[in-house]
Image (cartoon, rainbow, N blue to C red):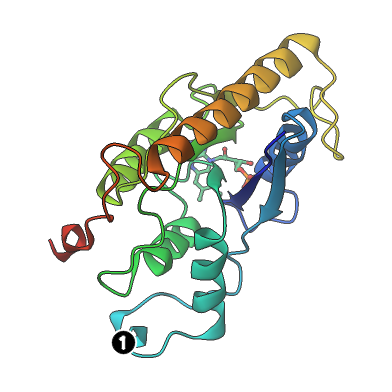
Amino acid sequence: MASFKIGYFVGSLATGSINRTLSKALIKLAPEDLEFTEIPIRDLPLYSYDYDADFPPEGRALKEAVEGSDGILFVSPEYNRSIPGALKNAIDWGSRPWGSNSFARKPTGIIGASVGSIGTAVMQSSFRSVLSFLDAPQLNAPEAYIHYNASVFGEDGEVKDEGTAKFLRHYMDEYGAFVARVLAANAPGHIGDLEPDAEKLSR
Ligand SMILES: Cc1cc2nc3c(=O)[nH]c(=O)nc-3n(C[C@H](O)[C@H](O)[C@H](O)COP(=O)(O)O)c2cc1C
């Protein structure tokens, strides 16, 4: 069975992050052919194009991690109805220097947990615009807006409610199938196989 390398981002820097707990649950419930490695965002400086001539090690490591992944999964909270600053900063690093957008053609998934009933839906909506601009294909369905309940999620990623576990397992099955489809479509020689459009980021 082919196995796929999945780089995942946790969009929270908080020690008690519920999204980090959700990421552990997702990894436990994912199909066995997905191998997960976290792409850290904590130590990235705030991006400026002044760095473009000579990226710092943290920026280079992020780009290498994204480019070395078959697929990317974002597990993120919603802050003030949008993408947390630390995560948006990481995306900006990965998108530059101009003409070397590391996210181009990478299959992506977005999922998030919130203490509110809206379950990160507004953040995910803005995130989808960002990923579209970066030419990153996204899993469109199922959508996953998680209203976090501490009695359902164990610290180690155990999911204590079978309905929730079933939904998250289904999400990860669909995500894995989506990664496989996009990689097949991206494969050299496949009809429509073209270089990613670097010019796109000039706008
Ligand atoms: C700065 C800030 C802004 C927030 N804004 C929202 C919001 O827009 N929508 C929401 O559902 N929850 C919001 N929350 C509450 C988060 O859902 C909650 O803090 C959650 O634990 C964040 O996920 P994390 O623990 O993984 O960081 C906000 C929290 C913070 C700290």
Nearer to us in this view, 181 or 149: 181
Q: Quadrant of residue 124?
A: top left
Nearer to us in this view, 144 or 171: 171
> Furthest-left residue in view?
203
Task: Classify residue 105 as left or right of residue 149.
Answer: left
Asked if 168 appears above or below 133 in the picture, the reply is above
Residue 84 in percent (x, y) is at 47, 52
Q: Residues within 10 Å of mark 1 (few under 14, many from 20)?
A: few
Residue at 67% over, 38% down: 2
Q: Quadrant of residue 148?
A: top right
- The residue that label 1 is drawn on is 50
Q: Under 8 Å from ligand 1: the CB of mark 1?
A: no
Residue 81 in percent (x, y) is at 39, 39
- In the rendered image, the quadrant that contains the C terminus is bottom left
Q: Quadrant of residue 77?
A: top right
Q: How many marks?
A: 1
State ligand 1's quadrant.
top right
Residue at 30% over, 45% down: 193
Residue at 53% over, 47% down: 72
Task: Classify residue 50 as left or right of residue 81.
Answer: left
Q: Evaluate whether residue 161 shows in this view.
A: yes
Residue 135 in percent (x, y) is at 30, 47
Q: Amino acid at mark 1?
A: Asp
Asked if 116 appears above or below 137 in the picture, the reply is above
